[in-house]
Image (spheres, grey):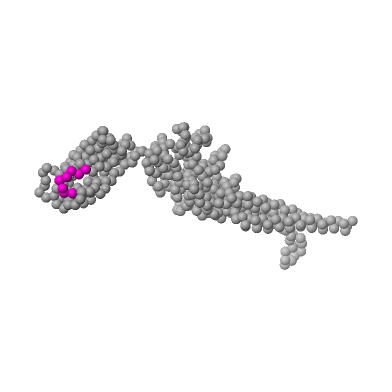
């Protein structure tokens, strides 16, 4: 009877732990990225109640204990949001990395409710993200709602507030797992000017002796929109077959008040209108040479019967631009966006994996840390994980399941309490019989 009291007490203690775990699960049913736990029980030692030899055992158990509170790794539901920095990992394999706290400890989480926020060495800024504020040293970090830095790989192309080099999307690989760092970017960033270097012309000059003019906008090294103009007039002396045109190329500023360069040349076409030669060379655009490409054969300008028309002029070059903000794409890459319409990758959010996810040690809330059981964080060589943008993963706790388990645990607790009261009553009866 004494042993039954001990067994009952161990049951009460174990089931109380089970109720505590379920209560925490239910409390976090609406917590983003929450991973529920389940209580696992094991019996205590067995005690022999007879030393005689028998074909059956003569043992009794000594109660129950909590053997583990195992992490539930099933994936929660996904909810769509309006925030491009709300991220979720597709499937149940993978974790975001965050770092922070008094000791800058590393944690791992499934909660991807992140935001870009101003930050410098003095801490948070009171001004909003846009405009960026007064301090030239202000930076922008990708952080969670608790202020922990999100970790990943930096492209290291934002030194001194100027983007260099430009990194296209889908072009940034994660660095080694051991060198991932906080994703911090400059709050003020300039996309460098890319002066025009090539001008490609496509069209028909016709055969009539009428001057033809073609104009295009070109970008100068000073990030100015200048004008490139080609004026074609039929040559005074024409070849025996075909036609030739004298061409004058001019570069000038937008209002025409300043001429930067003038070049002349001769363009010849055969009897079918195909371009056979051009002596027009490069032209200076306020410090940057532009190659004027009129094509060859029928690939550029032609001169044959029919209406004169310029089909297209293709000019390279990009105006300088100022940063308008950062976004995250479906590859987890951090994209810088500029006033000139250009974009560039400046970083990439890392997805971490572990040999034993259930071995992660719960820190607080939705944060977990590495343990000996989990092993160190790793990256997969292929298919490291897929990030969903404008998406948050909800808690993986199913309320109806948790409430059912709570009822079962409550009944178990009541039954354990009943065994104690029953054993106590039997003990009292035994004592009364001996009195």
Q: Residue at x 54, y 54 (%)?
A: 77
Residue at coordinates 74% horizontally, 60% vertically from top-left?
A: 60
Q: Residue furthest right?
A: 435
Q: Does 212 lie within the magenta span? A: yes
Seen from the viewer's position, the closer of residues 167 and 309 is 309
Instruction: Judge left or right: residue 391 versus residue 321.
Output: right
Q: Residue at x 72, y 66 (%)?
A: 56
Vertical position of residue 63 compared to residue 218: above or below: below
Residue 299 picture location, percent across and down: 23, 50
Q: Quadrant of the C terminus?
A: bottom right
Residue 402 lies, in percent from the top left, at: 63, 55
Up-down relation of residue 186 to residue 109 (above or below): above
Of residue 15 and residue 226, the one placed in the foreground of this image is 226
Q: In what quadrant of the picture does the N terminus appear? A: bottom right
The kind of secondary structure the magenta stretch mainly shows is loop
Q: Residue at x 55, y 51 (%)?
A: 394
In the rendered structure, does residue 64 fall within the stretch colored magenta?
A: no
334 or 267, nearer to the observer: 267
Residue farthest bottom in this picture: 55
Q: Which residues are magenta?
A: 206-213
């Amino acid at each position: 009877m004494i042993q039954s009291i001990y067994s009952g007490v161990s049951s009460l203690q174990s089931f109380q732990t089970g109720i505590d775990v379920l209560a925490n699960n239910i409390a976090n049913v609406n917590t983003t990225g929450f991973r529920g736990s389940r209580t696992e029980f094991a019996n205590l030692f067995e005690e022999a109640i007879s030393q005689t030899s028998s074909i059956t055992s003569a043992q009794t158990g000594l109660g129950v204990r909590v053997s583990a509170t195992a992490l539930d790794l099933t994936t929660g539901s996904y909810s769509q949001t309006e925030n491009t920095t709300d991220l979720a990992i597709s499937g149940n394999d993978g974790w975001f990395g965050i770092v922070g706290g008094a000791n800058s400890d590393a944690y791992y989480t499934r909660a991807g409710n992140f935001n870009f926020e101003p930050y410098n060495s003095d801490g948070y800024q009171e001004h909003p993200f846009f405009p960026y504020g007064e301090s030239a040293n202000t930076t922008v970090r990708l952080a969670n709602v608790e202020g922990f830095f999100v970790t990943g790989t930096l492209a290291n192309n934002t030194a001194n507030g100027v983007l260099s080099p430009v990194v296209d999307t889908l072009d940034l690989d994660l660095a080694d797992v051991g060198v991932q760092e906080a994703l911090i970017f400059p709050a003020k960033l300039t996309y460098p000017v890319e002066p025009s270097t090539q001008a490609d012309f496509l069209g028909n000059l016709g055969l009539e002796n009428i001057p033809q003019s073609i104009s295009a906008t070109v970008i100068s090294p000073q990030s100015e929109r200048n004008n490139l103009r080609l004026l074609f007039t039929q040559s005074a002396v024409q070849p025996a077959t075909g036609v030739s045109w004298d061409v004058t190329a001019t570069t000038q500023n937008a209002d025409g008040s300043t001429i930067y360069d003038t070049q002349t040349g001769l363009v010849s076409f055969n009897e079918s209108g195909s371009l056979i030669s051009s002596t027009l060379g490069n032209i200076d655009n306020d410090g940057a040479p532009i190659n004027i490409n009129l094509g060859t054969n029928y690939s550029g300008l032609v001169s044959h019967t029919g209406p004169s028309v310029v089909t297209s002029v293709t000019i390279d070059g990009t105006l300088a631009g100022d940063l308008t903000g950062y976004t995250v794409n479906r590859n987890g890459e951090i994209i810088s966006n500029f006033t000139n319409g250009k974009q560039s990758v400046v970083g990439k959010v890392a997805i971490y994996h572990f040999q034993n996810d259930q071995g992660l040690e719960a820190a607080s809330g939705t944060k977990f840390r590495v343990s000996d059981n989990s092993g160190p964080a790793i990256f997969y060589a292929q298919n490291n994980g897929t990030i969903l943008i404008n998406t948050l993963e909800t808690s993986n706790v199913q309320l109806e399941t948790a409430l059912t388990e709570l009822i079962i645990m409550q009944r178990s607790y009541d039954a354990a309490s009943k065994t104690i009261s029953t054993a106590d009553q039997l003990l009292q009866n035994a004592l009364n019989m001996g009195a």
